[in-house]
């Protein structure tokens, strides 16, 4: 079976988008998880002078509390992980008021997302938007699974009615990333809740909430309560974004007992986690001072990116995340990426066929200032 790409309504998109070519040209897409080398020989983090704004990390992490916990845990690294994971599981269970037997862990949420995709692809096709963080569904495609996509609205949003209509008996799971990556846009929580309740009568609904904590109203935007109400809804969360632990690789999934068992069929379970990462997650989970500090800095960076784009005559998609999707108009996002890289600013290139859109992460303020300074020069080079 091959992935199906519906282009319904595609030509109604802004004139900035041209069809075709990106994937064939081997350009950057949301497929790539790998973080590019930033300096030969440098093992950790970006090289001095390099503004790394391409993978939505929180550069203020890990928190001091996490660093202290990791040092302590690493000193005991001879032992397999034990009580720390039990502690993390209880903390998550308590926070979301969900039985701990309904919490699955993996090394980053990529793991649990992949395991669920592998399980559900055996039951039928996976349905999702044309543009979302589809890296983990691709694991299921490599095993012969099918991904059906629906076209976005003219403003790059997700038409939940169209998504609902696309749920045929062949669909085993709908996957939504909320807020979405790479657009950064969040769905109306009331409409999403209605959709989840309706759609989950027909198939499993997976909501990837990797950036939930960065939204204006995390509680309202979360679909976790639906799991407890018995709807066939699954939610994935991660410590990689606001918690500042992308390199420590801790993610989790909240689901019914039945869906948790499906994930477990493909998972290494608790053995997939490492002592230091879990220690860092435990220390960060309630570190409100660090989390608020990080969120404030991220929003500041987002403001600066938005105003920079506007000053340069560009527009942006409304973001509720730690990145911004910038509309370059008729310019090519891959060429823009290359021009920015020449100035030591690392951003993303083209996703799918959206050739005029460029994603940039809300990194350290000084790095975003470097982005702001580099943008006019890159635009000038492309317009020359
Ligand atoms: C929407 C979304 N979900 C999940 C992930 C996976 O992150 P991790 O495996 O680090 O938890 C990412 C990473 O960028 C993401 O953007």
Image (cartoon, helix red, strand yellow):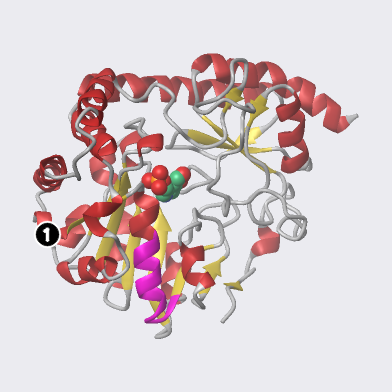
Q: Secondary structure at mark 1?
A: helix
Residue 179 visible? The answer is: no
The vertical placement of 78 against 267, above or below, is above
State which region is magenta.
114-125
Front one among 275 and 155: 275
Residue 210: % across, % down: 37, 45
Residue 175: % across, % down: 41, 63
| Quadrant holding the C terminus | top right
Residue 203 visible? The answer is: yes
Residue 24: % across, % down: 75, 60
Residue 46: % across, % down: 55, 24
Q: Residue at x 23, y 19 (%)?
A: 289
Specify few, some or many for label 1: CA neighbours under 10 Å numbering under 14, 14-19, or 20 or more.
some
Which image quadrant for residue 49?
Answer: top right
| Quadrant holding the N terminus | bottom right
Front one among 4 and 275: 275
Residue at numbered disc 1: 101
Which image quadrant for residue 320?
Answer: top left
Task: Judge from the rendering whether residue 81 lies leftward or rightward of residue 127; answer left or right.
Answer: left
Q: Residue at x 66, y 63 (%)?
A: 10
């Amino acid at each position: 079976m091959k992935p199906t790409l519906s282009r319904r309504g595609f030509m109604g998109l802004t004139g900035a988008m041209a069809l075709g070519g990106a994937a064939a040209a081997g350009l950057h897409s949301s497929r790539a998880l790998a973080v590019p080398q930033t300096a030969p020989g440098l093992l950790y983090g970006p090289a001095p002078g390099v503004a790394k704004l391409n993978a939505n990390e929180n550069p203020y992490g890990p928190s001091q509390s996490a660093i202290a916990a990791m040092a302590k845990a690493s000193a005991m690294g001879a032992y397999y992980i034990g009580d720390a994971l039990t502690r993390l599981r209880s903390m998550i269970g308590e926070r979301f008021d969900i039985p701990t037997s309904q919490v699955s862990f993996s090394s980053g949420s990529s793991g649990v997302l992949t395991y669920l995709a592998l399980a559900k692809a055996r039951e039928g096709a996976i349905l999702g938007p044309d543009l979302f963080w589809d890296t983990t569904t691709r694991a299921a495609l490599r095993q012969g699974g099918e991904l059906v996509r629906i076209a976005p609205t003219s403003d790059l949003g997700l038409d939940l009615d169209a998504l609902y209509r696309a749920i045929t008996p062949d669909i085993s799971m709908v996957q939504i990333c909320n807020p979405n990556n790479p657009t950064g846009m969040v769905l109306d929580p009331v409409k999403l809740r209605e959709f989840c309740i309706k759609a989950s009568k027909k198939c499993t609904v997976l909501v990837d909430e990797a950036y939930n904590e960065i939204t204006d109203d995390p509680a309202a935007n979360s679909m976790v309560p639906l799991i407890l109400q018995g709807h066939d809804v699954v939610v994935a969360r991660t410590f990689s974004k606001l918690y500042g632990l992308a390199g420590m690789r801790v993610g989790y999934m909240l689901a019914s007992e039945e869906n948790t068992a499906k994930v477990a069929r493909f998972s290494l379970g608790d053995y997939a986690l490492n002592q230091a990462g879990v220690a860092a997650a435990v220390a960060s989970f309630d570190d409100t001072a660090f989390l608020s500090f990080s969120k404030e800095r991220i929003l500041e960076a987002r403001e600066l990116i938005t105003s920079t784009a506007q000053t340069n005559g560009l527009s942006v998609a409304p973001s509720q995340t730690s990145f911004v999707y910038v509309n370059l108009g008729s310019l090519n996002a891959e060429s823009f990426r290359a021009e920015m890289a020449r100035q030591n600013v690392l951003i993303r290139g083209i996703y799918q066929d959206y050739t005029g859109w460029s994603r940039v992460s809300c990194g350290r303020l000084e790095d975003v200032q470097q982005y702001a300074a580099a943008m006019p020069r890159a635009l000038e080079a492309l317009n020359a």
